[in-house]
Image (cartoon, rainbow, N blue to C red):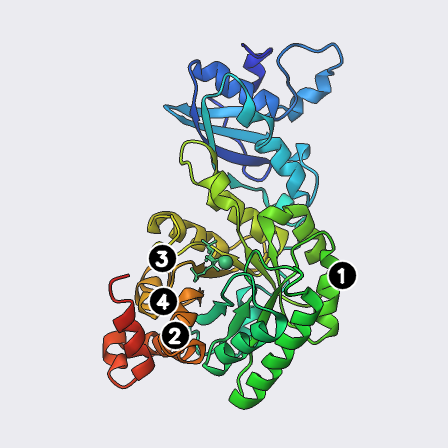
Amino acid sequence: MKYANQDKYLDLKFNPDPDKYVLADFYMECGAEKACAAGLAAESSTGTWTKVTTTKRRIDRLAAKVYKLRGNQVKVAYPVDIFEDGNIPQLLSDVAGNIFGMKIVKNLRLNDLTFPKSYLKTFKGPQFGMEGVRKIIGTSKSRRPHCGTIVKPKVGLNPEETASVAYHAWAGGLDLVKDDENLTSQKFCPFEDRVIKVLAAMDLARSETGEKKIYCANITGVNMAERAQFVKDHGGNCIMIDILTAGYAATQEIRNINFGMPIHAHRAMHAAITRNRRHGISMLVLAKLARLSGVDQLHIGTAVGKMEGPVKEIKEIHDAMYEQLAGIKSVFSVCSGGIHPGHVEPLVKNFGKDIVIQAGGGIHGHPGGTLTGARAMRQAVEAVAKGKTLKEYAKNHIELDTALGKWSKV
Ligand code: CAP
Ligand code: MG
């Protein structure tokens, strides 16, 4: 089907002003390229499949325009006025909405988005950002990577057991303990009880180690503000949201309340949207939107662990978390998924020290248990901070040596 008024939406001589247009990069597979690209711009701005009698001449200024078309690459400029200030769902319903389902499109992938400064300024962004989180732990000077764990098994432990695992992880030297993405408030581990017990364990570990610690309580659900308030009222210092299953609006609402705690963002479900390189939305775009929505830490992938994602793509996401962005704070990148202490070296080599390194299995699977596993991970982080190789450091650090031995082939 040919969309009406195609010419209005296609102008390959157009040079959009990045201060006035949201710019999108697409990969598109379609039989009739021009018609398809123009249809895409029409569908996400002022057009539809046929001419309508209700349009007005003045509305033409809101038409999105295809300004580049080369092979499968399509670039589209959207006048900033078609977007509502600070509204991520509206942005997505527009630039990544109906277009994916259009019959004329075979495959379509939104690879990147860039935004005018004036529009960026309508988002709150992170309250703490990487520097704010570093301040909580006290690493603003040392600049070492943070290290943490996910309590495992993912589900099944009760609040006492969860708190005990958390205590051993902190006591062994980890900075952060977090709930798993699918642990919220099930009958075997009710949220309130867990938060009270894990925070007590955190206090104990803090006083014993003299170190500052973070607990990311997973508030994902339909009553997130209440859960966040509960964490705050009980002396907690971080909340976690599964930002894609919960949604950007829910995340923005929590951020906009200003609970005074960093938000740790888990990206469960992202691969349903990001994994097919010929269709869907790239993780880069989802991560940029996460930053605008106001999260302080975001899972970006590892390239070396159990989850899919090449180094080049993850590095691009990582860079986007730290690039200058109209005064919006940076997001602390989290590398997690199949990680063990032996991965600390390649992670730092690939992404630098401004990362949070997280391991679940790679801590609790240590032959000596959680405490020893945590020590091994902290030793690995200390080694890279001191510019030593893990192999060298392991000579005098038995916990690290055991971990490297156990997972040398993983
Ligand atoms: C890691 C993890 C995280 C993944 C998410 C898990 O556990 O808790 O959810 O890292 O991946 O459930 O798999 P392990 P990503 O350390 O035991 O693998 O960061 O890519 O979103
Ligand atoms: Mg998990």
Give whichever of 181, 291 is nearer the camera: 181
Q: Tell me the residue at 36%/57% (across/down).
A: 305
Residue 343: x %, y % from top left:
33, 65
Do the residues bearing badges 2 and 4 touch, measured as CB atoms within 8 Å? no
Give the answer, above or below, for where 180 lies relative to 173.
Answer: above
Circle 4 residue: 340
Q: Secondary structure at mark 2?
A: helix
- Whether residue 66 sits left or right of residue 251 in the image: it is left
In the rendered structure, which disc, 3 or 1, sits on the residue that comes first in sequence? 1
Residue 177: x %, y % from top left:
53, 71
Q: Secondary structure at mark 1?
A: helix
Query: Given the image, on which type of amino acid does mark 1 rest?
Result: Glu
Cα distance, mark 3 to mark 1? 35 Å
Query: Given the image, on which type of amino acid does mark 3 rest?
Result: Gly
Give the answer, above or below, for where 334 lies relative to 133.
Answer: above
In the rendered structure, which disc, 2 or 4, sits on the residue that comes first in sequence? 4
Q: Tell me the residue at 51%/79% (across/down).
A: 170
Residue 105: x %, y % from top left:
48, 20
Residue 17: x %, y % from top left:
55, 35
Q: Secondary structure at mark 3?
A: loop
